[in-house]
Amino acid sequence: MSEQRCAVVAVLGAPNAGKSTLVNTLVGAKVAAVTQKVQTTRALVRGIVMHGDVQLVLIDTPGVFAPKRRLDRAMVAAAWSALEGADAILHVVDAAAHVPGGKKSGADLHSVDDSERIAAKLKALELPSILVLNKVDAVSRPHLLAITTKLVEQGLYTDVFMVSAKSGDGVQDIARTLAERAPEGPWLFPEDQTMDAPARVLAAEITREKAMLRLHDELPYDLIVETDSWEERKDGSARIEQTIYVARESQRKIAIGAGGQTIKIIGEQARKEMEAAFDRRIHLFLYVKLREDWSEERAIYQRLGLDYEA
């Protein structure tokens, strides 16, 4: 029997660079919330990949950006803490945002600034990293060459991978490289496990993703989902009650929608994904409640695995 090998891999990047999508594609299952809005990954999510006899433990971190609020500071601190004990670091960069010339959106400008900030800190900490250029299917070859040349000149990256995390193109090349370099050591999780968060946490993440996808720009990041109860039924199904907490009354009305239609659609989408994730029937009941200043509550940070004092 061959020796077991295991690598802990930290996945860093600017908000919306595609970190969660990359982790989900590598794992082959839903692990982290994925929306077109930035800063969706609040706590460290560990996706687990088996590549032959090698176990890869992927730490999907919150997007690294310039923090303003307490929650922002805690998220960024959590992202950098993921580097402690990591065997490899993936720096995911949104290639499309780095295309030279032309008028850039505010989000693209922020993405470039945040990526440069991450690279500078990795270099200052003397942490060699693997560059993952994501969304390359949206970039022409000449631009891709220019972007790659500029980033590689920093002398930080040991390898460069060009991928589309969404379609999966090039992703398995990353897994193969990480597996080849993984150190000898026992697996940290059972072979058939895909994430280390309990089902209640994953269920809350699924609902939060659906809420953010549905509400788009109408609701900012002042929402959190908690799984209040999980009841096992005799027929093998599960009855789940969850509460979506928002910070203002106006947000509560938006989340519920006219005649309760918005929350109904969010619930239907979340239930379908939970049934696929948990391979069973789910009876989902959602409530929307006002919880002003929830982002200042110490207990919330503890549940999310974030440092309140960051």
Image (spheres, rainbow, N blue to C red):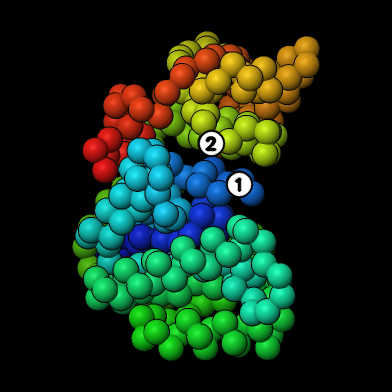
The residue identified by callout 2 is: 221
At x 49%, y 66%, the residue is 113
Instruction: Give the quadrant of the C terminus.
Output: top left
Residue 48 shows in this picture: no
The correct choice, above or below, for 23 with respect to 256 in the image is below
Crowd tier of the residue under label 2, counting other residues whose Cα lies within 10 Å: few below 14, some 14–19, many 20 or above: some
Q: Amino acid at mark 1?
A: Lys
Element type at mark 2: loop
Q: Is residue 170 left or right of residue 48?
A: right
Viewer can see residue 141: yes
Task: Tell me where residue 282 sits by quadrant.
Answer: top right
Identified at 46% across, 19% down, the residue is: 292
Label 1 Cα crowd, 10 Å radius (few <14 / some 14-19 / many 20+): some
Q: Secondary structure at mark 1?
A: loop
Q: Are marks 2 and 1 in contact (CB under 8 Å)?
A: yes
230 shown above or below 140? above
Question: Residue 24 versus residue 151: which sits nearer the camera?
Answer: 151
Find residue 43 and report its image quarter: top left
Image coordinates for residue 37, horizontal then vertical, percent: 60, 46
Amino acid type of the residue tagged 2 in the rendering: Tyr
Depicted 250 relative to depicted 84: above or below: above
| Cα distance in 3D space between marks 2 and 1 | 9 Å
213 vs 233, left or right, is right
Residue 291 in the image, given as x and y percentages of width and height: 47, 17
Q: Which residue is mark 1?
A: 37
Residue drawn at (40%, 49%) of the image: 67
Image quadrant containing the N terminus: bottom left
- The residue located at (31%, 56%) in the rendering is 80
Disc 2 or 1, which lies upstream in sequence? 1
